[in-house]
Image (cartoon, grey):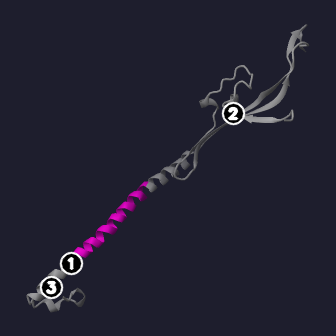
Amino acid sequence: MPSGTVYLSKPHFYGHNSSQFNINGFSPEREKHESMIYFEPYSGTPVKAHHRIQLNVNAFVDTFKYRGGEWRPSMNARVSKRILPLLWIDQEITLNTTALGQLQYVHRMVKILNIARFVALAVAIVIPIILIVAMELRSKSVAGKRRNGDPDFKKQPVLLRTRI
């Protein structure tokens, strides 16, 4: 890799092998250093996002000693190659209350439509059964009047008469 390469990682090198990064003071924790996105399940809308990223550079590190009032490179220390963190970006985005209200409305409508679907199915099953039973009872009533010689039988409309 070129010496000026910039690397992206999770903050404090969370999730990396700690033996590669010899930096004191880094203590990666999931709650503080992991990126997260929460989605609304019906529409897939991101409700909350928390993105954390760290920019690092590949660098050679010399050791310095303080001598005679100034910092000077140590002559007997060796130069080490390290990945040094430069910048940590922490962004959080949360959906506003208006958009959350619209999502709650969608949830309510989905629940209502699920209930309405089952009610419509029940009505579609019950109404034909009621009609069949009513037609059968009407047919038996008309047939009984016909057999008994009811004088009002012929006065009924043609659509309601049934022949046996």
Disc 2 marks which amino acid?
A: Lys
Q: Are marks 1 and 3 in contact (CB under 8 Å)?
A: no
Residue wearing tag 3:
143
Q: Compared with residue 105, is residue 33 higher up or lower down, i.e. above or below?
A: above
Q: Are marks 3 and 2 in contact (CB under 8 Å)?
A: no
For the image, the number of numbered tags is 3
Q: Compared with residue 146, is residue 52 higher up or lower down, i.e. above or below?
A: above
Q: Compared with residue 118, is residue 37 higher up or lower down, i.e. above or below?
A: above
Disc 1 marks which amino acid?
A: Glu
Which residue appears farthest toward the left when viewing the image?
A: 148
Q: Residue 15 magenta-drawn? A: no
- Real-space Cα separation, disc 1 to disc 2, in angstroms: 76 Å
Q: Look at the image and tell me whether residue 95 can be seen.
A: no
| Residue at the (69%, 33%) spot, across then down | 10
Asked if residue 37 lies left or right of residue 61, the reply is left
Choose between 105 and 129: the one closer to the eye: 129
Magenta stretch, residue numbers:
111-133
Q: Residue 118 magenta-drawn? A: yes
Judge the density around disc 3: few (<14), some (14-19), many (≥20) Cα neighbours within 10 Å.
some
Dot 1 or dot 3, earlier in sequence: 1
Which of the 4 quarters of the picture holds residue 37?
top right
Residue wearing tag 1:
136
Asked if residue 52 lies left or right of residue 120, the reply is right
- Real-space Cα separation, disc 3 to disc 2, in angstroms: 86 Å
Disc 3 marks which amino acid?
A: Ala
- Tell me where residue 6 appears, x and y as whole percent: 80, 35
Which residue appears farthest toward the top when viewing the image?
A: 68
Element type at mark 3: helix
- Tell me where residue 20 appears, x and y as whole percent: 74, 26
